Image (cartoon, rainbow, N blue to C red):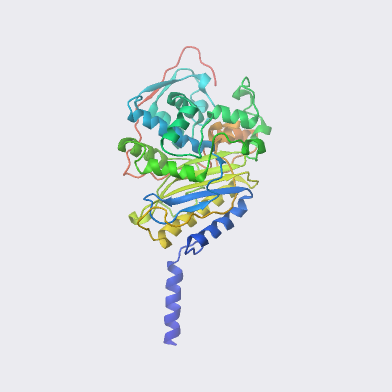
Amino acid sequence: MIRRVARLIVLVCVLGAAPAYADVSSVESLRAEIERIASSARGVVGVAAWRLDGKGPSVLVNAREPFPMASTYKVAIAGAIFDAVDKGRLKLDQMVPVSLQDYVPSEIIADRFIHPGVSLSVSNLLELMLTQSDNTATDVLMRVAGGAQAVTAWVRAQGIEGQRIDRDTNGILRDFFSLAPDVAWSDVVDDAELATKASLPNATFDNDPRDTSTPEAMARLLTRLFSGQALSEASTNALVGMMRRCRTGEGRLKGQLPQGSVVAHKTGTIGGTVNDVGVIDLPDAKGRIVIAVFVKKSEASIEQRERVIAEIARSVRDFYLFKSKPRSSPHESAPIRGSAGGLIAWLRPLGSVTGFLRSRSCPSSSAAGMRRGASWWSSSCPPGLSGASSAWPSAPSHGVSCSRSRSSSRA
């Protein structure tokens, strides 16, 4: 009787201590778990993950297949801008005029600054691009960086292949929705057909090599940025702080992590694509995990695509926290490869075609839902704070100038 009680106590203790997710004791079993989760995306899923310090195994599923980046390409734009700051070509407090002609459907600038006379500092444009996925801020910064080719050149200078930046958000969205250059965004804000199209797979777009990245290339870019290899210490801290303050995609990488988990990330959403990429801090200073999860050609709902990303992120996080033992040299174990599912996250700031673009996790297919979204290509779910850590500097409060001219017009 005593032995039975003892066994029962041991069993209860073991069960109580076990993580809530599947027990994956090896990269092979983790790959199988990721593929099981990915099957519900009804598309193609790509994953690349490893420890930021380079120790231990890598987790790779469809990691060398190109995926539409959507708004996750804004990470590269931010890197190019911070690099220009480090080299003295730009200053964070430098004011940049934003004209009405620059406006692209977006949640903040195009939606709220409706009168002429707007100027924002480089730091505030970065903040809007990375935390709200604002498309107008993105296109202004891309122009300041020298254009798409200049951003791609910066990525190549980091030694990264498999990622390319070809268009600004205005160009990407117009191509996705098949809108001519002379069609004003204000004329299609209430277009219910476009709002519906915003969350559906688009074969032509999905197979377009432009503005794509492999999960592996994105994870390598994040590794260089977060490890301090690409930027100065000050710029690295500023970038990480902004990505920790990201207000989009609460249901993605962060969706099933324990409350209070520190995650610096960037989402992307458009058509059949939903993405989230970033760095997850393990508790008790046990390290940081670089992770990129892409979904494309998905016929599942956006909520389901986000759930897939959330479950994959939790499984990867628990593997590195409970099972993986860091090794002395980076990526010693063989990469994991498998198949999975998909979505795009850029449209959040599209806003309406706009409201939907907001990149909320549950965008409405109605025209009214589009109006509420103003930024779908950039974010992916109800906005919420990302748990910024006091270890990183807070965003500067200076650098906003909105002067009204005598004649005002709506964007």
- Split into 4 quadrants, where in the image is the C terminus? top right
Residue ID at (45%, 31%): 153
> Residue drawn 41% across and 62% down?
322
Q: Is residue 105 visible?
A: no
Indicate left or right for 211 with 319 as reference.
right
> Is 177 positioned to the left or the right of 5 in the image?
right
Which of the 4 image quarters holds residue 394?
A: top left
**Residue 120: image location, x then y, percent:** 41, 24
Residue 132: % across, % down: 47, 35
Q: Say if residue 400 shows up in the picture.
A: yes
Name the side, left or right, on which 353 lies relative to 164. Answer: right
Q: Examine the rendered structure and indicate whether residue 411 appears above or below residue 330.
A: above
Image label count: 0
Given the current orientation, which residue lies at the most extreme bottom position? 1
* Of the pair 277 and 231, the residue shown nearer to us: 231
The residue that appears at 40% across and 30% down in the rendered structure is 81
Please say if 177 is above or below 16. Answer: above
Quadrant of the frame with the N terminus: bottom left
The picture places residue 107, in percent across and down from the top left corner, at: 51, 32
Q: Residue furthest top?
A: 406
Q: Residue furthest right?
A: 193
